[in-house]
Amino acid sequence: MTKFSDLTLHDVLAGLEAKDFSAVELAEATVSAAEAAQGDLNCFTVIDGERAKAMAESSDARRARGEAKLLDGVPIAMKDLFAVQGVETTASSNILKGFKPEYESTVSGNLWNEGAVFFGKTSMDEFAMGSSNETAATGPVINPWRAQGSTEKLVPGGSSGGSAAALAAGISYGATGTDTGGSIRQPAAFTGLVGAKPTYGRCSRWGVVAFASSLDHPGPFGKTVKDTALLTQVMSGHDPKDSTSYPGEVPNWVKAVGKSVKGMKIGVPKEYRMDGMPGEIDKLWTKGVEWLREAGAEIVDISLPMTKYALPAYYIIAPAEASSNLARYDGMRYGVRVEGDDLTDTYEKTRSAGFGNEVQRRILMGTYVLSAGYYDAYYVKALKVRRKIFEDFNLAFEKVDAILTPTTPSAAFGIGSKADADPIEMYLNDIFTVTANIAGVPAISVPAGLDASGLPLGLQVIAPALDEAAMFTVAGAIEEAAGFTAKPEKWWG
Amino acid sequence: MSVNKDDVRRIATLARIAEPADRLDALTGELNGILDWVEQLNEVDVDGVEPMTSAAPMKLPMRTDEISDGGKREAVLKNAPRSDDGFFVVPKSVE
């Protein structure tokens, strides 16, 4: 029998249906693999064998009764940003240490309702603020991928780095993430996975620890485009508990995968060709364009002139929203409290001890741009630029059905290699992904090749709002043409 | 625009974060680096542009004003750092 770790989500569903193995056997193997890898990869914050077994037993019983649902018996790794009832949920921050929510996030609830099996929560950059998973309170997550002939430890990307590492290591069959500036797509590119962010409002934010509410997008990681389409479909849906939740129906996106791109118009934006971009990234992008042309798509040169302003606008809007959202961590009703001389002293000591450096930096930045005298110059200005970026996309999508770009400006880098750099160097990781968050449009990263040192690189497909079908169709065509089958060589436990 | 150490102290007070005394110089430099970098937004002509406050052009939904959830005192208090007899216990806030 093939090893569990090589199976895709759809392979697992077929295996369960054919009774090649039971959900309990699969859950036990998953938990063992997670426990064995944890010492080397550090990708989990919680591993819960008991709950996995109980959920898998129910799943086996459902399947035996002929009542199996869309994801029945499939273990899914949950980013530690999603509230899972009764399980420690910390957003990888010390300030939420010990917090066990008494409620379930809508997205995780949607997964369990379709039979998915919970087995663990994955590490992330603290409060989803980072691109390397080095700011987690539980320490850095290690990428299963290493450069050829090297043992240097690489970052898995961030902020959903634990989910990406766990799935890339073959421990899970799908994983959840959240993407505020690229936090699903960038780690997907760094670990050879597919990572998608549907349209803003498709996946409910209820029960997801908030970072920047107008930019936060829950979404999945999958080993294939088809797996990712199914996960996105299950995670999406209207939720009255999130006032920004999209009320329309969720289409069947699995059916969009494998459709021909013949006659589709694919935009190639010249502004994504950045100065100093590695030649390999440019070459891969050109290859992607060729693949789609050969598959029958029409390639159209387009212009998104506001592209270079997306990241600076993001670094005003996101910290502003974060400073407001994170005001709730005051040590009074939940989370950690550090007692002080009086109420204010208690607030200040609690927040100073509970938040890490990057989170404090962003809270300060956000507080500054919202403070009297600076609000118009920074915050309102950034919101106006945001509309210009949004209009850029609207104009482009009058001419094309989807846009093709690289996902990241580089492959995975070494742990600690940017420790002495200024924060902006780390921020630049999101330069190609952040525009889709600013505009709220769906975007996906598909593994498309390896760089000279054998590390994975991704291509990004951006589609018009609510047209995830186009996104999955184009992503499927790239996946097929790229034939990406590389896997990291196993060195971890 | 740029910030000095006093500004950073003032922002920290507004954000209810204890004065980061040991990192004050570094933080001031980092915040100025970011502020310098976002200055490029001034190149964009935003005359007459409406600020965009939501990621999707949608109207917020209305609902009837009625109680749909509640009666969960125990659950609400479960994660409190300190609680007593059905109440949160917090430092004195009124003299």
Image (cartoon, coloured by chain):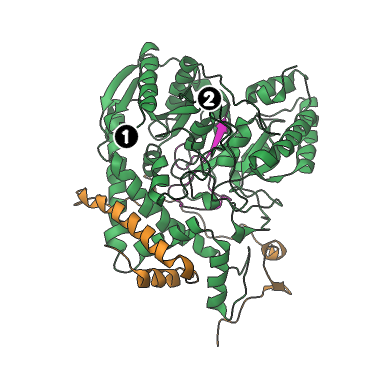
Chain colours: A green, B orange
Q: Which mark is residue B60?
A: none
Q: Nearer the viewer, residue A359 or A233?
A: A359
Q: Nearer the viewer, mark 2 or mark 1?
A: 1
Q: Nearer the viewer, residue B34 or A315?
A: B34
In the rendered image of this protein, does residue A2 appear above or below residue A96? above
User: Under tag 2, what secondary structure?
Assistant: helix
Q: Position of residue B76 (x, y in %)?
A: 67, 63
User: Circle 2 marks a residue in which chain?
Assistant: A
User: Under tag 1, what secondary structure?
Assistant: loop
Q: Position of residue A129 (x, y in %)?
A: 49, 50
In the rendered image of this protein, does residue A480 appear above or below residue B92? above
Let me know if residue A330 appears in the view.
Answer: no
On whether residue A119 falls in the magenta region, the answer is: no
Q: Is residue A294 left or right of residue A206?
A: left
- Give me the residue at 46% from left, 25% from top: A451
Badge 1 is on which residue? A276
Q: Earlier in the sequence, mark 2 or mark 1?
A: 2
Q: Is residue A291 left or right of residue A486?
A: left
Badge 2 is on which residue? A225
Cα distance, mark 2 to mark 1?
A: 30 Å
The amino acid marked with disc number 2 is Val
- Indicate the quadrant where residue A286 lies: top left
Q: Position of residue A467 (x, y in %)?
A: 42, 30
Q: Position of residue A363 (x, y in %)?
A: 45, 61
Q: Which residues are magenta?
A: A197-222
User: Circle 1 marks a residue in which chain?
Assistant: A
In the rendered image of this protein, does residue A449 appear above or below residue B75? above
